[in-house]
Image (cartoon, rainbow, N blue to C red):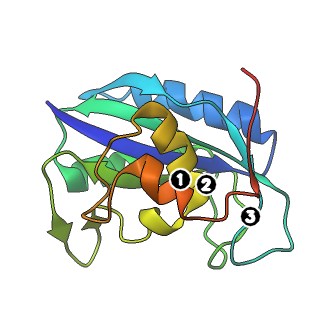
Amino acid sequence: MSRAFIALGSNLEQPQQQVRAALSALDAIPGIRLQRASSLYRTAPVGYLDQPDFINAVAELETELAPLALLDALMQVEERFGRVRSFRNAPRVLDLDLLMVEGVVLDSERLTLPHPRMHERAFVLAPLAELQPDLAVGGHGRADQLLGTLDASGVERLAS
């Protein structure tokens, strides 16, 4: 079993419910066991700004799946939830990003691990630091320290 971290996001069709349902869907995949999930966070959109705020979270999983098989499973969940990839940073029902798999460094055409931009994204680091503040993020530093270097003004932790 390997430990993996997944970022979840939604800003369409009742985003809080979408993220909660996605956590259950992840836990139901054979070879994956949901260990814990962060709080939900309301976050301002990045890139394409003319869209609703997002609901984001991070999940910690134990998995028997190899990284590319895990990526495929995540994409299947997105598809089941109605994900449409119309353009970069477009509004979406569900976005699942594989952030890291413990002990795995990978740079392939389909997948780069650890995720190459997670250290730049407060909407990822806030929930990740909630789960494991001292987690080493791809050679860039600890999750909590990296979060402290970013503008997190558009990131709001929601009450449980």
Instruction: Determine whether label 3 and label 2 are within 8 Å by CB.
Output: no
Mark 3 / mark 2, whichever is N-terminal: 3
Secondary structure found at label 3: loop
Front label number (3 vs 1): 1
Above or below residue 160? Residue 51 is below
Question: What is the spatial separation of the Cα atoms under label 3 and label 1, in whole angstroms?
Answer: 17 Å
Q: Is residue 12 above or below residue 37?
A: below
Image point (32%, 56%), residue name: 137
Residue 130 shows in this picture: yes
Which badge, 3 or 1, is on the more N-terminal residue?
3
Q: In this orientation, which residue lies closer to the viewer: 25 or 5?
A: 5
- Residue holding disc 2: 123
Q: Residues within 10 Å of mark 3 (few under 14, many from 20)?
A: many
Q: Residues within 10 Å of mark 2 (few under 14, many from 20)?
A: many
Q: Is there a contact, CB below 8 Å, between mark 2 and mark 1? A: yes
Q: Which residue is mark 3?
A: 91
Separation of disc 2 and disc 1 at Cα?
4 Å
Q: Quadrant of the C terminus?
A: top right
Q: Is residue 76 visible?
A: no
Of tags 3 and 2, the one toward the viewer is: 2
Q: Secondary structure at mark 2?
A: helix
Q: Position of residue 97 (x, y in %)?
A: 45, 55
Which amino acid type is marked by label 2?
Answer: Phe
| Pick the front one: 124 or 74 | 124
x and y percent of residue 38 in the render?
Answer: 54, 31
Image location of residue 151, percent across then percent down: 66, 64
Number of the label disc, if any, that sits on residue 124: 1
Q: Which mark is residue 93?
A: none
